[in-house]
Amino acid sequence: MTLFITGQTAITPGALDLLNRVNINPFTLLERHMKGDFGNVGHYKDAIIPDNPEENPPEDGLSVNALVIKQKQGHVLSQYKVEDCGETVEVWVSTHIYDFHQTTIYLPEED
């Protein structure tokens, strides 16, 4: 079950090059992202949303993601580690949820 839709989706040249090199299909990361497996950020099922987030906003990325999904507004970020030639590199997947949905797969240095 997916928690949200990705909408228009793009991948940066750096992320595409890396994922091709390490033989990871970008759709695998998108599927994990939509199902609440946010990689290093955590998993949706483990999130704790404060009772009154307006007065006590969540500070950790996992709870922020969960609140964005619940309120259907904001920015959901996943961070996935991949091995590239013996080096650990991160690939990020980011979905902006507003009146529209837009998702980008990118490397942190491309932000």
Image: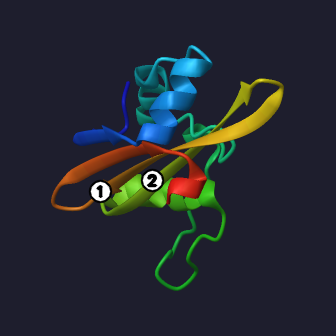
Q: Is residue 44 among what the camera can see?
A: yes
Of residues 61 and 1, the one drawn nearer to the viewer in this rendering: 61
Q: Relative to 106, does residue 20 appear above or below in the rendering?
A: above
Return the residue found at the far bottom: 55
- Residue 14 in percent (x, y) is at 50, 40
Residue at 41 percent of width and 34 percent of height: 34
10 Å neighbourhood of mark 2: few (<14), some, or many (≥20)? many
Q: CA distance from mark 1 to mark 2?
A: 8 Å
- Residue 90 in percent (x, y) is at 66, 41
N-terminal of the pair, mark 1 or mark 2, is 2
Residue at 23 percent of width and 62 percent of height: 98
The quadrant holding residue 18 is top right
- Give amino acid for label 1: Ile
Q: Relative to 102, does residue 31 appear above or below in the rendering?
A: above
Q: Give the secondary structure at mark 1.
A: strand
- Residue 70 in percent (x, y) is at 38, 55
Report which residue position mark 2 lands on. 76
- Residue 43 in percent (x, y) is at 61, 39
Of residues 38 and 85, the one drawn nearer to the viewer in this rendering: 85
Report which residue position mark 1 lands on. 97
- Give amino acid for label 2: Val
- Quarter of the N terminus within the rendering: top left
Tag 1 and tag 2, C-beta contact below 8 Å: yes
Of residues 81 and 95, the one drawn nearer to the viewer in this rendering: 81
Return the residue found at the far left: 99
- In this rendering, would 40 be left or right of 71? right
- In this rendering, would 66 be left or right of 71? right
Return the residue found at the far top: 23
Q: Is residue 6 among what the camera can see?
A: no
